[in-house]
Image: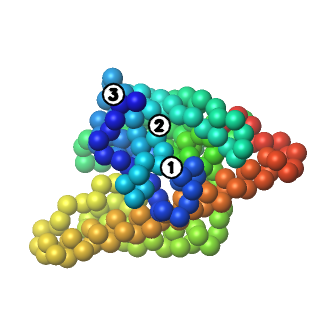
Amino acid sequence: MGGLGSGRTSGGGRVTAEACRSIDVNRLRREGVLSAGWSGGWEWKRNGERISSISIRGGEDRIVLSYRSRIGSQDWQDVEEPIPIRWVPCRYGGRRPYFVCPGIVNGVACRRHVVKLYCAGRYYLCRHCYRLTHASRNEDSCDRALRRANKIRMRLGGEPGYEAMIPRRPKGMWRKTYDRLFEAVIENESRAEERLTRMAARLLDLDQRLGTNTRKPKRGYW
Ligand SMILES: [Zn+2]
C-alpha cells in the first residue's frame, strides 16, 4: 500500500475505530486522489497511531476503495467499492467535486451528491443511507453546531454548508476577527461531524442487533 504522508483523523476519539471512518471528497481532492492514475493508501490516526487504512485507486470520474471489512464477529471480507465522482460548476467559476453515494436501500439507488461518506457498516455510504438523520438528540446539537457555522460563513460573504470553501477575509475586517470566525466555523463543523460519527456508531450496533436477533429482511445489497 502506498503511503500518504499525512494521516487522516476522522471524528472524535470516543467511538470505535471500526465505526468512525469517513472520507471527505475535498480532502481527497487536495491530496490529488481525484486525478487519473493516483493510487495509494488512506489512513486514519488517533493519538499518532494508525487505527485503520484502506487502499484507493484514484480518478477524476470514479475512485475505487478496497479494504477488508468485518461486521461484528463475522469473517473478514474483501471489499471493492467503486464510487462515482460528479463535478459541479460553481457559481463564480471553477468546479466542485461530489461523491455520488453508491448506496442501494430497498432496491433503490441513492445517488445523492455528497461531500462525505461514512463507513458505519460494511460500505462507505452517505448519512442518509445510514439513516443518521433519525437520531434525535444528537442531531439537534449537530444541527445547532452547523447552523452556527453557517451563520458565520454567510457573515463572511460565503455560502452555507460545509461543502463550500470558507470565504477569504472580507475587505475591512480585522485579521484577528477573521481568524476567530474561521476557527469557529472549523470548530462547529468538527463538533457536528463528531456527533454524526457517534450516531453512526450507534446505528452500527442497531444493525447488528437486527441482523442477529430478529429475522427481519436485511436492507439488502448496498
Ligand atoms: Zn446514500
Nearest to N terminus: mark 3 or mark 1: 1
Furthest residue to the front? 49
- Tell me the kind of residue under disc 3: Trp
Measure the alpha-carbon separation of dots 2 and 1. Answer: 10 Å
Marks 2,1: beta carbons within 8 A? yes
Residue 216 vs residue 92, the one in the foreground? 216
Is 123 on the left-hand or right-hand side of 63? right
Is 138 on the left-hand or right-hand side of 95? right
Residue 115 in view in this figure = no
Measure the alpha-carbon separation of dots 3 and 1. Answer: 21 Å
Furthest residue to the top? 37
- Give x and y (percent) for residue 197: 54, 58
Ligand 1 contact, mark 3 (Cβ < 8 Å): no
Residue at x-position 39% and y-position 35% = 41
Judging from the image, what secondary structure is the residue with disc 1 in? strand
Nearest to N terminus: mark 2 or mark 1: 1
Residue on which the image places disc 2: 54
Residue at x-position 29% and y-position 35% = 32
* Label of residue 38 in the image: 3
Whether 216 is drawn above or below 162: the answer is: above
- Tell me the kind of residue under disc 2: Ile
Residue 70 vs residue 216, the one in the foreground? 70
Residue at x-position 20% and y-position 61% = 168
Judging from the image, what secondary structure is the residue with disc 3 in? loop
Measure the alpha-carbon separation of dots 2 and 3. Answer: 14 Å
- Tell me the kind of residue under disc 1: Arg
Residue on which the image places disc 1: 21
Label 3 CA crowd tier, 10 Å (few <14, some 14–19, many 20+): some
